[in-house]
Image: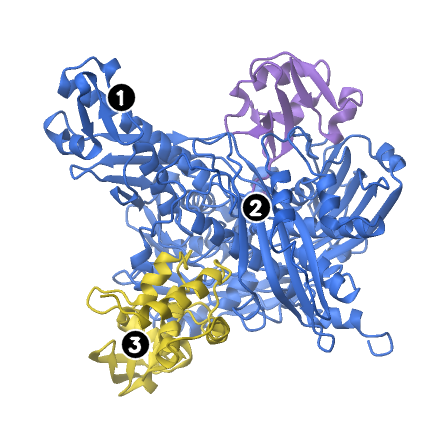
Chain colours: A purple, B yellow, C blue
Amino acid sequence: MATVFIPALMRDLCGGRHSVEVEGATLRQVLSNLEPECPGLYALVVEDGMVRLGIQLAVNGVTSSSGLLRAVPEDAEVQILPAMSGGQRSAAP
Amino acid sequence: MSSRIIVTAEINGEPTEFLADERDSLLDALRERLGLMGSKEGCNNGNCGACAVLLDGRLVNSCLVMAAETEGARVTSVEGLAQQDRLLPVQEAFLDHAALQCGICTPGFLVATQALLAENPDPTEEQVRYWLAGNLCRCTGYDKIIAAVLDAAGRAATPAG
Amino acid sequence: MVAPAKSPYRVVGTRPVRPDGTDKVTGRANYGSDIRLPGMLFGRVLRSPHAHARILRIDPSKALALPGVKAVITHTDFPAAEDAVADLGETSSNLKWLVDNVLASDRALYHGHAVAAVAATDPHVAEDALALIEVEYEPLPPVLSVHEAMNEAAPRIHPNMHTVEMMARFTPGPRSEHDIPNVASHLRMEIGDLDAGFADAEVVIEREYETGTSHQGYIEPHNGTALWNEHGELTVWLSTQGPFAMRDSLARVLKLPVSKIRVVPMEIGGGFGGKISAYMEPMAAVLSKKTGRPVKMIMQRDEVLFGTGPTSATYVRVKVGAKRDGTLTAAEAYLAYESGAYPGSPVGAGGMCMFAPYRVPNQRADCYDVIVNKPKVSAYRAPGAPAAAFAMESTLDELAEQLDIDPLEMRVRNAAVDGTRRIDGVAFESIGNEAVMTAAKESPHWNSELQGENRGRGIAMGFWTNGGQESSAYATVNSDGTVNLVIGSVDIGGQRAALAMQLAETLGIDYEQVKPLVVDTDSIGYTFITGGSRTTFATGWAVHEAGLEIQRLLEDRAALIWEADRELVHYDDDGVIRGPDERSLSFTEIAKQLHRTGGTVQGKADVTPEGVGPTFACHIVDVEVDPETAKVQVLRYTAIQDVGTAVHPAYVEGQIQGGAVQGVGMALSEEYVYDSEGRMRNASLLDYRMPTTLDVPAIETILVEEPNPGHPYGVRGVGEVPIVPPLGAIASAIYQATGVRPRTLPASPRVLLEELLPDDEG
């Protein structure tokens, strides 16, 4: 089971929970399996089959550009983070 | 249209004649008329020292000198420091101490240091810091530059066998 | 230096001379402004004198009539401008903002905003032409601070913009309760239970802090030279941190496929995050298209200051709760950062970093991205973190004093360790935070006695994390036993050396055998910017992988030469290939044979490495404050940092020293000064006061090498975190020296004197 940490302003979609445990071998599976627990969250994170602009997903604290195809190890932690990284364009444009 | 002036000067040891716009600074002339791109423009008003050259042996910011003023003068830019494929001790010291990061301020620091060592071959750290206060560096925090200058002074004092 | 007892490496950890060094000490290195092409024209930019104005009319006819002037362009010359007029959702509004920031359309939104550009046969003529372009403005009231901007009465700088709730279930809209004037976005990060955390606290303090706008201050102004040829192919030569990022920006603004654009990175004279965005490059391209000639553009220094992206001025309110023994129970922050004229301040990063060095179970940060009539901010070394850390570190210092705990001990007691969760929920792994604090505690500086009147010592922590992202590299073995290493990462401060060293280490050869070359966007795979503390880490990964491929190919070749079982052939760490029957070939020996045994060997790699390593820094500073003038002199400075493995320690130290001194500038002297009309009044390097040799002492460095397990050589990013602690450390030192705690930085003599003088004099 992966543990998904829910951002503060999305928690009321998940009954106020800070984190939810779900199955899934990839980020896409994890987020799909999360939908019954947190209705509406998938669409806030995914747009046109890709992670929305402005959001990045971390597996065990590490972000990558592999998007939803990324493998999620057993017992991994998944975080939904704002897209910002160092010394780089912090946001649009 | 502004008019052009013929200037005759000794540039890095070579007698040189060039055509300058009356509004050209010495920096403009070195870069745009003579193709000597080593002197850098960081501010174009004498605040950063990246364009420092020696004018008749005196340290100046070439952006503040008009090209026309250099008639009959001796000008040494960074390109004129190394002699026949041999780097000066200060150039060697900058490399050994990693005293440059991006390197844009380096020509100005090297020329300024050369002027300092000509006047005072054995400066203290405080004297080095005073002398180089007109040269801005944004990458290094100056630490390694100061170390390189002090080292170069030592090397110049004890020529290699 | 705290280093491993015995380095496992031969090349990594040494201090060789950089490959591009000789060119850079002889004036031969070619920077962006040094390029000269046949028939080249010179471009200049006309900029708005108003901070906020409607542009009613632009008439270039007089300028075009000046002999030597070849073209004038305005916003309408950009193809993307047509589409950008319609509001087609987030992506297109971002495109509109991008295009409008390059050249203003209907309104100028800051003093220095580009309005038109000219190309002429001579730089002096181009300058003359600017005065002949007639622009009619209708000035509008400017909005100049986050406080003004967020007020209900404030003019809306982007009337159709509404506050986006980031990472939230709410959607933006005009009637949304979440809509705040001129706030582009709000982000909340939270862990634990804040109310419970404060209920648990025995001492709670809440304070407000502000910082001014500061600039990256690279000595080389922006430059760009463009040639748009008859086949519709665009080549741009320039100084940039990100050739591929620039190619992407040009493609968007000019509506060109990336394959039509070649970006050639020249040597770069500093960036610090400021040389990523497009400014003049699209203008140079369009001017070239219009004239059929190459066009070179170089900014003047005042244009660099008021026309490119500095960092945000900020307002931060922080509230911290602790037990009597110093244990932190809760921390809350409200951060409002100026983004300038278009959205995109680094406020989220500020909120993410400010509490990170500490184990605080209950945290919340509310981050507001605020539009004002100032230049659109861009990245600046650890963007957003210095101002936020200043607030937290100052508050922590005050808390320690109230609880009568030594300020370093206060930090040690609360140090984040492996497993501690950050505010974004991520748990730390393999961090050197405690090791940094321990090294600070044991440092000669901390254990020295500070004597003398009006002197004080301050200490502060800082946190940042490095980026991963895409990097490519390939390496070809030459018959003389050298290797040509080709990279797409621009060398902004020794990267060629640090990358060549990693390849030499992988191949077991000498550093001098590797010849690195930085190439253009047509000549290598996509490589993300030199920035984000990523290059030695991520491009280092690519270089290492390319080296491993060479190892494998040379093993194949040796097996072929020896007619040996492939499984029995091994490339060893010393660069010698060994096989059965004690056969061996050195790297140089096999290199000589390649052409006659099947041809050249080349290794290549395209990577997107994970395993980024968080970095922590602790700075200690002693200052003396002149009681008459309130001028602060830095007397001694020590920077301690977890750098992972220091590949080239001299350049690691250099990054730390340079970052610390930029932080000193932020703390003491650097600030944009605006008048009430929003005009920048100190746009020169005399009046925008960056530290000189006289303003700083030697910067002592202590490298804590806690290898990053996510990198083959244990590399962590080192470039950014050193700018984070100086503000807090210096503010605390000033407090120790004077009894006055600066809550607004820079603590310039003008500001500090008002605090220091008795009321009747102040």
Q: Secondary structure at mark 2?
A: strand
Residue B76 placement: quadrant: bottom left
- Viewer can see residue C313: no
Label 1 lies in what chain? C
- Above or below, C455 relative to C420: below
Residue nearer the viewer, C149 or C693: C693
Q: CA distance from mark 3 to mark 2?
A: 41 Å
Q: Secondary structure at mark 3?
A: strand
Instruction: Give the residue type that dot 3 points to.
Output: Thr
Label 3 lies in what chain? B
Mark 2 sits on what residue?
Answer: C641
Residue C713 placement: quadrant: top left
Residue C374 placement: quadrant: bottom right
Q: Residues within 10 Å of mark 2 (few under 14, many from 20)?
A: many
The residue drawn where x is 36% and y is 51% is C236
Q: Which mark is residue B76?
A: 3
Residue C505 place in picture, x, y as percent: 34, 36
Q: Secondary structure at mark 1?
A: strand
Looking at the image, residue B86 sits to the left or right of residue C760; the answer is left
